[in-house]
Image (spheres, helix red, strand yellow):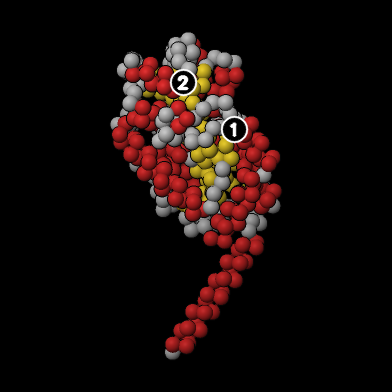
Amino acid sequence: MRQTVGGLLAAFCATLALATSAVAQSYPDRPLKLIMPFGAGSASDSIARIVADGLGPRLGQRIVVENRPGAGGNNGTAAAAKAAPDGYTLVFAAPGPFVINRTLGGLPYNPETDFEPISLVARLVNVLVVNPSKVPVKSVSEFITYVRSKPGQISYSSVGLGSSQHLAAAYFDIVAGTEMQHVPYPSGSQLAIDLVSGEVPVSFQLIPNVASQLAAGQVRALAVTTKERSKALPDVPTMGEQGLADYESYAWFGIAAPKGTPQAVIDRLNREIVATVADSAVQKRLIEIGVEPESSTAAQFKAFIAAESVKWADIIAKAGIKLN
């Protein structure tokens, strides 16, 4: 009897291995859909389309980017969580719907249990900028001294509660011991107008959103918010170089699949995504729009999301950030 059970188990394992191999060899045999949980024309949308353009030829299939914005990225991400786990529907993962929003309120999905992380693809750096006529400083240390001398009087802009700009500034207040006032905007266009006019003279903007104002000298960059300098702004020092060694904040992006997607498919996608991000043409396009290319293993991406969740939950609690 034991030999019979053992033989059946061996046969089952062999059949499973053959089926897995067959999946890997035949996938994909039709176009893929990449759900973009933000609007067309956004920075994340641009990144997704650059990566999709490079990834499609490697898979031998077209990748259709489908914009499904709403609820801070929750709507599109929730739709992806319900999709068939066959490797033909993927989601563009971002900090909001995968990390931040779960701390600010309930979600119609679970980022940890409803998805298979595949790989990071890029990070988007924040840069601390000031209106030079309203905030007459040229370094982070000068900025800290200036803001401390006017507690609660200096305002900074963002595109909304829990956005990258908002959290970068809130985190800065905690680390630097400053107290600034948050002014959320419904759109980036009005934010840019008020930043240039000095109405709201400070912002921890994503680099692509403020590149033209920096080039025109309308705002001054004091520091980037990553541990290393940005390829897009190589002359702008980091926060660490200016005394805030523990400070790091940036938006990141990756690709994930619905939970239950076959491991062979995840492995294939990871290999091709990593190769795509390493491609010189793709890197050139990303760097040109102020984005830092970055890939990972699936396990590294999963661990990264878990670490980010812990980090930002703590910062949000310390900053007292809550949904209105």
Judging by the rendered image, the residue that carries numbered circle 1 is 231
Instruction: Say whether residue 314 is visible.
Output: yes
Q: Which mark is residue 139?
A: 2
The answer to which of 10 and 19 lies nearer the viewer is 10
Residue 166 in which image quadrant: top left
Relative to 9, say whether 30 is above or below.
above
Mark 2 surroundings: few (<14), some (14-19) or many (≥20) residues within 10 A? some
At mark 1, the secondary structure is: loop
Position in image of residue 277 (x %, y %): 62, 44
- Check if mark 1's residue and mark 2's residue have beta carbons within 8 Å: no
At mark 2, the secondary structure is: loop
Relative to 287, say whether 88 is above or below.
below
User: Marks 1 and 2, how far apart in space?
Assistant: 20 Å
Residue 97 in the figure: left or right of residue 277? left
Amino acid on which the number 1 mark rests in the picture: Lys
- Which is more N-terminal, label 2 or label 1? 2
What residue is drawn where x is 47% and y is 88%?
A: 3
Tell me the quarter of the image containing the C terminus: top left
Position in image of residue 122 (x %, y %): 55, 40
Position in image of residue 222 (x %, y %): 49, 22
What residue is drawn where x is 59% and y is 71%?
A: 18
Instruction: Say whether residue 193 is visible.
Output: no
The answer to which of 131 and 83 lies nearer the viewer is 131
Position in image of residue 71 (x %, y %): 43, 35
